[in-house]
Amino acid sequence: MTPNAGLMSVAAAAERILGGQVLSIAGDEAALRQLPPGQWIGGTIPYFMAAEGGTVSREQVFVQVVSDYAAPPRLRFYDAASLPQLCRNAPEHGYSLLIVPAFSTCHSDFARNAPNYEDMYLKPLAGWVAGTHLDDAGRARPQVVHGPTGQFSAEHAVVMDVELPPERYAQIEILNAFRPGEGAAITFAQTGFDAGACQIDGSPANLADYLLDQAIDTRLPLVADYCGAWVNVSIKDIDAAARRVAFYAPVFPGLTYRVAVPVDGSGATDAVPSAADTVPFACNCILNFLYGALEGKPSGPLTGPVTFGEIGYQLLNQTQVYLRVR
């Protein structure tokens, strides 16, 4: 596992930055603004899966160390127009870490269009969606940070491209405890973060009506098979009057969704990296943290920020994602 990573004080993180380490850092905006310039990227969030368990802290930051690189990593901002070049610009042998601010144009565009980016799925891409303390919803904007300049942005994505030596390779792991249930097959005609009209078991229907009529637990995501991987779309809320359902990630046409089978809510699985792996990045979903009541509970071997969305090539919900270098 990666040494010197974990939840720590701002002073301890600053010492690592000034020591020249290459880092990915998560923390509350006020804490991140105290850090010096250096070779790091960051995003705002005060929720963490730490070694001591689920933690909420506005004073501490979570540091993840990037090592094993063959050349100094490249750190850069992307705007919505340039973000589709993300994978094409990535190293031929290595990986990219991406942080996107929630509710930004980059967030929406990436969620909808990432599967169609040039070289997507050919080069490892992991990351997370920055957020805020839930008490600050509607007041504070999620931000990302370009460490070399100290610049914060609520509209750009920030990326670290890491080239690896020939004997090392990166692998993205997506840990999803949810599986589709035996209920109705749900399909959609359009891509979107919300939906009303749909097909249920092949017949025209309204998703909001169906979820309410069936008393579906909306803590359970919709699950579909995305080319052999189970991917969740989490339900944000139901507007009964408008007969529409809002999601935390988009649904796509051409896929069959079903409501997930209930699990313990933590999103955890038994899959863990080996002791020989370097793990420069891991994250867990804020919905797993909330629905599983994980504050103060053991985190397991995977630690990192608790996020407003996970990135394992594309945008994910209610999963854990980690990147290992083998």
Image (cartoon, grey):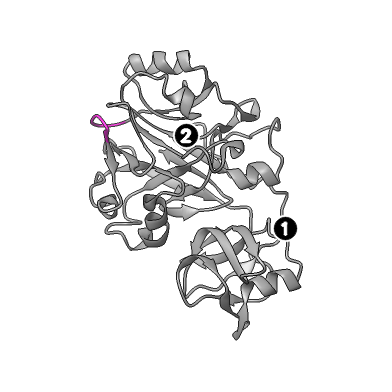
User: Eyeballing the image, is 201 above or below 132?
Assistant: below
Q: Amino acid at mark 1?
A: Pro
Please name the residue shown 38% across and 55% down the image.
110
Label 1 crowding class (10 Å Cα cut-off): few <14, some 14-19, many 20+? some
Please name the residue shown 32% across and 55% down the image.
122
Residue labelled with disc 1 = 262
Residue 1 appears in the figure? no
The verdict on residue 74 being magenta is yes
Q: Which mark is residue 44?
A: 2
Answer with the quarter of the image where residue 71 lies: top left
SS of the residue at dot 1?
A: loop
Q: Would you say 8 lies left or right of 89 here?
A: right
Give the x, y percent position of residue 324: 44, 39
User: Eyeballing the image, is 24 above or below 291?
Assistant: above
Give the x, y percent position of residue 274: 52, 36
Q: Amino acid at mark 2?
A: Thr
The stretch of residues the image draws in magenta is 69-75
Answer with the quarter of the image where residue 181 lies: bottom right
User: Eyeballing the image, is 108 above or below 20?
Assistant: below
**The one of 146 and 245 positioned closer to us in this rendering:** 245
Please name the residue shown 54% across and 22% down the image.
60
Q: Does the magenta stretch mainly form a helix, a strand or a loop? A: loop
Q: Which mark is residue 277?
A: none
Q: Assign the C terminus to one quadrant of the image.
A: top left
